[in-house]
Image: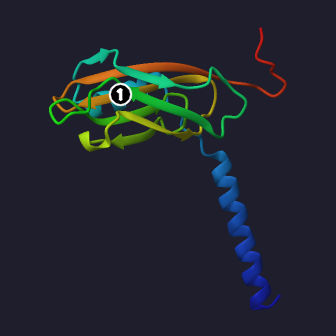
Amino acid sequence: MNRREFGKLWLLSLVGIAAAWRSWTPVARASELDVEKHIAALTNNRKLEQGRVAIELPQISRSAKSVPFTVRVDSPMTSSDYVKSIHLFAAENDLPKVASFFLSPKGGKAEVSSRMRLKKSQAVIAVAEMNDGTWFIGRRTIEIARPGFTGTR
């Protein structure tokens, strides 16, 4: 065996060890408690008020890879009353914080839309910070269809 063959063999064994190591390491999964901790840290343990935050999601999605969403916050978006930020969480994802959006009154509307990846059926939570320091929360549940699932029970 020459040096070149030894180098190839060494590199292949290193790749094999790395692949085996990755499959043995446990995958961390978030929970509702983890999301509550994230939100408490984000809001400095301030009280979250219900209302004003609406999340639009499909009730059932055939694919978890790209789920459309819209978050709307009831706000006039004036210089004296506006939404500073919107934060989106999905408790069953490996990383529960999905996105953060920062707004100003110049935007005109307190509304954001995008797509997200979800691991499985779960609750999606949005929290919105107002310019006066108050926080609002909204929730919506989505079901991710299994292969062969028709959407009826």
Residue 10 is drawn in which quadrant?
Answer: bottom right
Percent from the top left, x then y, of residue 7? 72, 83
Amino acid type indicated by mark 1: Val
Q: Quadrant of residue 62?
A: top right
> Which image quadrant for residue 44?
top left
The residue depicted at 38 percent of the width and 22 percent of the height is 53
- What x and y, as percent, mark residue 39? 33, 29
| Quarter of the C terminus within the rendering | top right
Identity of the residue drawn at 57% across and 23% down: 122
95 vs 87, nearest the viewer: 87
Q: For the point 28% across and 16% down, which residue is it?
A: 49
Report which residue position mark 1 lands on. 127
Q: Is residue 124 above or below residue 7?
A: above
Q: Nearer the viewer, residue 121 or 12?
A: 121
Give above or below for 25 relative to 36.
below
Query: Which part of the image, by quadrant, shows the N terminus?
Result: bottom right
Q: Is residue 35 left or right of residue 151?
A: left
**Nearer to us in this view, 152 or 77:** 77
| Element class at badge 1 | strand
Q: Is residue 119 left or right of residue 47?
A: right
Q: Position of residue 119 (x, y in %)?
A: 62, 34
